[in-house]
Structures are given as C-alpha cells and as structure tokens.
C-alpha cells in the first residue's frame, strides 16, 4: 500500500476521532459524560473499517483534480460518518449483535440501561438510543460535507445535492431489503433474482462505490460527460463489491468479517446468492427435498450443522460458482471502463486489486 494511501487513511481517522467526542454535540451545558456515552458506540464503530468509501471518493478526485496529490479528507470523512449512520440503522433493523467485531449500538445502549438499573425497558431504550445516534451521525455527515474540498463553490453545491440524493436512495434501498424479507419465498425465481439485484444496487452498490467515485469527480470539477464514464466503472464494481460481501456473509470467517457466520441466512436476506441457490435447487426436479430443506433453513437461528448443510446446498447446486462468474464479469467490465476513460488513479488501481482479493 502506498504512503499516500496510508497517510490519507490516517488523516481521515484523525478527523473522525476529533469529531466523535463530546465537543461535537451542540449542547455544551450537558454533562460531558452523557455526551461521551451517547457517542461511544459510534467511536467504537469508527475504529474499525477499511475506509473503502473514503478511498473511492479520493480515487474519483485523483482522476480529475488539478492537484491530485492533495486528497479531500473532509469530504471523505463525511462519507465515513454517513456510513456509521447507515450501519447503526441497519443493525437495528436486522437485530444484529456484532459489527466490526464490537457490540452494535442498540446492544451497547441496552447494556448501559441494565448497568445503571434505569426504569423501563432496556430493549426499547437500546433501540431508541441507537436510532437517535444514527440520526445524529446523518446530520453530522451532512454538516461535514458542506465544508468539503472542491475546485469551486459550484462543484461543491452540485456534490452536496448528489450526497443528499445518495442518503435518500440508501434509505429506500434499505426499505426494499427489509420488505424482501417479508415476501413469501415462492414469489417466482426470476422475480426474486431481479428484486435481489435491485436491492443490491440501491442499498449498497451505489453508496459503497459508484457515488463515492462520482462525488470525488464532481468535487474535482469533472464534466457531466465524464460522470457517465465514471458510472460505467462504479456500477459494475459496486455490484461486485456487494456480491462479494454476500458471499462473506455466509462463508466468511467471523474473525475477519467481524460478524457472525451465516448472518444473512438467519436474517432471511433475499440476496442474489440466495436467489440463485433457490433457483438452481428447484431445477433439480428429481429431488425436491433439497430445495425444501434449504428453504426451511432461511430466516431462523441455525445450528453449526444446519449452517454447514446450507453452505453445502449453495456450493453443490452450482449457485456459488455462478455467483463467482457474475462477480468476475462485473470486475472485468469495471476494469475495461477504467481503461476506456483513460484517467490515471493509483488509488482506483489499488482498490480494484484489493476488491478482487477481498476476504473481509
């Protein structure tokens, strides 16, 4: 990894450390210990992560900026603050207990309630506290992005609109994801696969890769015609990124991913990988029992043996191999689009290599 990338990550980390303490809260009359307690889960969550979105923003900037070596730390930190907000809300919806190897925000607040022997429901307190922390971080990210580095005020204003559209799109994508978990499994394999791709794009691929690249490019002064070319890199690469994440959600090592193995199956996530598995198992007409057994493993707590069996169906049906081909095809499309654009970015080259080798 280059010294430039290491320094950039360190600068973003220092920015987050500076913001995620009691002084960030506009209520200085309130005891600092209360303010610190409110932000503690966010600070812990910010301590992990690879700054992927920050780096994609830097890559977009690097491709178009007249000063490509002076990277946009404030804009990147705003994206990371938004990522914290999105993760906290996502964990509430999923009822997750671990994120990046640490307890999730709603679990932290619930434990605080129990430790202090406060009145009322600890579970409700935990959930409410985490919702409010996520909202706070969303507001803080917008305030931070208002000071983003930009080639001029017009570029910054355009990027701000794009940033706000991104946060709205992710909220709707999250709704699509949540809604999908309540739909009957037998709603049709092709429709399920289309729905899974739609969730993947709007909830994750756009804000993980495509929009960060676009934001960096806009802040650096890219022309409108350039942005279409950037999207031709960002969309397939973002889809590949999330599809790899879905594989890790089932097959990843919890020590590397920071999340329990098989979480997506337990939560009943209608991912592309799950949809492919169901479709390919259903094609084995000589034995419906496997398809029925796999369906019975979706959306509930699993024993180690049941998780092993579910993984076996995913591999044995050929779904994992098909899924890997889809990932590779998207990585190839993104690489070709980057060559076609002809804009140099050592950070983008590094990120594409890292994503191909990603295991966490």
Image: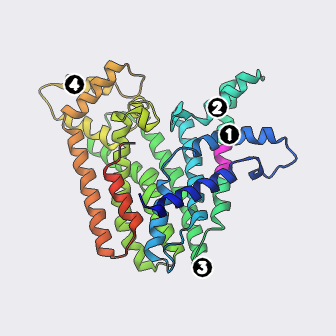
- Which of label 1 and label 3 is nearer to you? 1
Using the numbered discs, state the Cα–Cα distance from disc 1 to disc 3 in whole angstroms.
36 Å
Say if the magenta span includes residue 349. no
- Whether label 4 touches label 2, CB < 8 Å: no
Q: Which residues are magenta?
A: 132-137
Q: Which residue is mark 2?
A: 108
Q: Nearer the viewer, mark 4 or mark 3?
A: 3
Report the front residue among 72 and 80.
72
**Disc 4 from disc 3: Cα separation:** 58 Å
Please tell me which residue is depicted at 35% across the width and 47% down the height of the picture: 358
Q: Disc 2 to disc 1, how far (Cα)?
A: 9 Å
Q: Which numbered tag is attached to residue 40?
A: 1
Kindly report the secondary structure that dominates the magenta region of the rendered protein. helix
Residue 94 visible, this angle:
yes
Compute the Cα span from label 4 to label 2. 40 Å
Determine which of the numbered discs, if any, sits on residue 154 in the image.
3
Q: Are marks 4 and 3 in contact (CB under 8 Å)?
A: no
- Of 329 and 294, which appears nearest the observer? 329
Residue corresponding to mark 4: 290
- SS label for mark 2: helix
Q: Position of residue 14 (x, y in %)?
A: 62, 54
Mark toward the start of the polypeptide (2 vs 1) = 1
Q: Which residue is at the front of the view, 355 or 340?
A: 355
Q: Do callouts 1 and 4 mark residues in contact (Cβ within 8 Å)?
A: no
Give the foreground label among 4 and 2: 2
């Amino acid at each position: 990894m280059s010294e430039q990338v290491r320094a950039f990550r360190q600068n973003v980390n220092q920015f987050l450390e500076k913001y995620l303490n009691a002084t960030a809260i506009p209520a200085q009359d309130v005891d600092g210990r209360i303010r610190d307690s409110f932000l503690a889960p966010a600070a812990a969550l910010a301590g992990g992560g690879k700054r992927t979105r920050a780096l994609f923003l830097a890559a977009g900037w690097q491709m178009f900026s007249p000063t490509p070596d002076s990277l946009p730390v404030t804009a990147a930190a705003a994206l990371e603050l938004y990522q914290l907000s999105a993760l906290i809300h996502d964990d509430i919806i999923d009822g997750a207990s671990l994120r990046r190897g640490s307890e999730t925000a709603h679990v932290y607040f619930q434990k605080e309630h129990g430790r202090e022997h406060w009145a009322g429901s600890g579970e409700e307190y935990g959930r409410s506290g985490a919702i409010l922390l996520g909202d706070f971080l969303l507001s803080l990210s917008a305030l931070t992005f208002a000071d983003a580095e930009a080639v001029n005020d017009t570029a910054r204003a355009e990027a701000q609109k794009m940033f706000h559209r991104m946060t709205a799109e992710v909220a709707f994508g999250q709704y699509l994801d949540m809604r999908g978990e309540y739909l009957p499994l037998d709603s049709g394999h092709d429709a399920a696969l289309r729905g899974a791709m739609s969730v993947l794009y709007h909830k994750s691929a756009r804000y993980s890769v495509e929009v960060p690249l676009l934001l960096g490019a806009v802040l650096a002064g890219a022309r409108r015609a350039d942005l279409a070319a950037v999207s031709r890199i960002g969309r397939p690469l973002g889809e590949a990124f999330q599809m790899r994440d879905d594989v890790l959600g089932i097959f990843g090592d919890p020590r590397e991913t920071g999340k329990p193995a098989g979480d997506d199956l337990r939560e009943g996530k209608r991912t592309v990988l799950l949809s492919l598995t169901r479709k390919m198992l259903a094609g084995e007409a000589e034995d419906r029992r496997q398809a029925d057994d796999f369906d019975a493993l979706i959306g509930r707590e699993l024993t180690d043996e049941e998780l092993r069996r579910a993984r076996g169906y995913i591999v044995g049906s050929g779904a994992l191999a098909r899924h890997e081909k889809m990932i590779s095809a998207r990585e190839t499309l993104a690489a070709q689009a980057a060559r076609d654009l002809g804009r140099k970015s050592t950070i983008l080259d590094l990120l594409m290599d890292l994503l191909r080798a990603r295991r966490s």
